[in-house]
Image: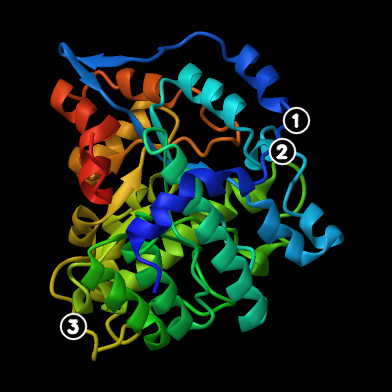
Amino acid sequence: MTTRRDFLKRASAAAAGVVFSSCGMLEAAHAQQSGGRRLPIVVKGKRIKTIDVHSHCYIRESTSLLGAAEESKLLPPIIGAPETYLGIEKRFKAMDAQAVDMEVLSINPFWYSKDRDLAGQIVKIQNEKLAELCAAHPDRFAAFASLTLQAPDLAVQELETAIKRQGLRGAAIGGVVNGVEFSDLKFHPVWAKAEELGVVLFIHPTGVPELSKRLSGNGWLGNTIGNPLETTIALSHLIFEGTLDRFPGLKVLSAHGGGYLPSYADRSDHACLVAPAICDSKVALKKKPTEYLKQLYFDSLVFTPEAMRHLARQVGASQIVLGSDYPYAWQLHPVDHIFACTFLSNEEKAAILNNTAAKLLNIQT
């Protein structure tokens, strides 16, 4: 059996096998949003290693298994999309410009609808290549594993391999699997394994296709509204179906500030009081729905200090970590965003920029 030590020993040489490319579209975007802090970042006289938990990439060897036509659909006509196929030097340059020391890479799931064998091949390649990349550049990259969640028994094996042998930091998952919510019993073995290993699951939505007709038209509503909505639904099911009670040690991190849930969380506390006949009497939650938010984690991608103020007040600043969605150009100065939140103490800024993510992901800084 290949040990993690053997794997990492080979990784630096093997990293050359990761396909890198870049079309430079983000150079124009950076030019439009020039300025901002540069490395190193110092808070109250102390050097802070900034960790961006929400950044993306694709691995050419895995996406090519889809065939050219389907592979091309992975790159929508948006700023930053080509850079998901990593160009290392350009990525480092961009990270330096953003004042980001380390990116935690993840791959949005495009394989849930594939059969077990093909999806398993895709996931195997991705996890191996991500591990090689992180081993070759341990000061700049960490990564979340991919999982074949449509086959939970396989996902359990993949997660254990990723953590114990490949040095990955948790797993990135979507917001739903082929219409089946994460609270479904079939996924419990995966959540149990994540809880046992003490690793985080990063929920990144891919939209709500059943609303595609209503979300068509101007404004890219399938993403603008659909992505935060999917996260809101996923988290709400985990809360209301008692999944978080069943797995109290489960670490869940949500992209985009947790979607809409933290913005209107108190409505959740009233739902079953107003309509007890509609709620399931067999599900007796151990606390109020809003209280579960204080055990979850959220990235900082909410754009404005006022939105951050509300998020921090609702979930606690201790539950927020730095996130940019890079290379997609949603927030090209994520560190500046934290410093603009003058209501945060220096200790809270340091926690968001580094300390919370370092502890959550077991990253030595």
Residue 228 pos. (x, y %): 50, 52
Residue 303 pos. (x, y %): 45, 30
Amino acid found under the numbered disc labelled 3: Ala
Amino acid found under the numbered disc labelled 1: Cys
Q: Secondary structure at mark 3?
A: loop
Q: Secondary structure at mark 1?
A: loop
Q: Which mark is residue 44?
A: none
Residue 13 pos. (x, y %): 53, 45
Q: Quadrant of the C terminus?
A: top left
Q: Label 2: which residue?
A: 82
The residue lying at 20 percent from left, 57 percent from top is 295
Residues at marks 2 and 1 touching, judged by CB atoms closer than 8 Å? yes
Labels 3, 2: front one: 2
Q: Is residue 65 above or below residue 204?
A: below
- Which sits in the foreground, 65 or 35? 65
Amino acid found under the numbered disc labelled 2: Pro
